[in-house]
Amino acid sequence: MSKLDGVIRVHPNGLNGKALVYVKDKDKVTKEQMEEALAKTEKLRLRKMEKA
């Protein structure tokens, strides 16, 4: 997922299985793209997207 354009870093939380995603611009990366990328992993879900 960190290879998507506009994603700076991904911080997964092992306790609850949710990932915090840091992006350059929220307009380039949509929530749907993040959920699609996270659907490929079994244990992670999107918690929040923050602009860094």
Image: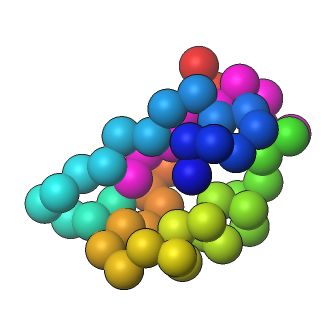
On whether residue 23 falls in the magenta region, the answer is yes
Q: Quadrant of residue 24?
A: top right
Q: Is 1 drawn above or below residue 27 in the view shown?
A: below
Against 32, residue 50 (above or below) is: above
Q: Residue at x 45, y 40 (%)?
A: 10
Residue 5 is situated, as x and y percent measured from the top left of the image, at 76, 38
* 18 on left or right of 38: left
Residue 49 seen in this snapshot: no
Specify the segment rendered in magenta: 19-27
Specify the farthest residue to the right: 27
At horizontal 36% and vertical 80% (from top left) the residue drawn is 42
Residue 9 % position (x, y): 49, 32
Picture coordinates of residue 50, whole percent (x, y): 57, 34
**In the current view of this chain or complex, which residue is farthest to the left?**
15
Q: Per the image, is 48 magenta?
A: no
Q: Residue at x 27, y 65 (%)?
A: 17
Tell me if 24 is positioned left or right of 21 in this view: right
Report x, y in % for residue 16.
21, 65
Judged left or right of residue 26, residue 17 is left
- Is any part of residue 41 visible from this angle? yes
Residue closest to the far front: 3
Looking at the rendering, which quadrant does residue 7 occupy? top right
- Viewport quadrant of the C terminus: top right
The mark tally for this picture is 0
* 25 or 4, nearer to the observer: 4
Q: Quadrant of residue 23?
A: top right
Classify residue 49 as left or right of residue 12: right
Please give the name of the residue rendered at 52% of the width and 76% of the height, measured from the top-left corner.
40
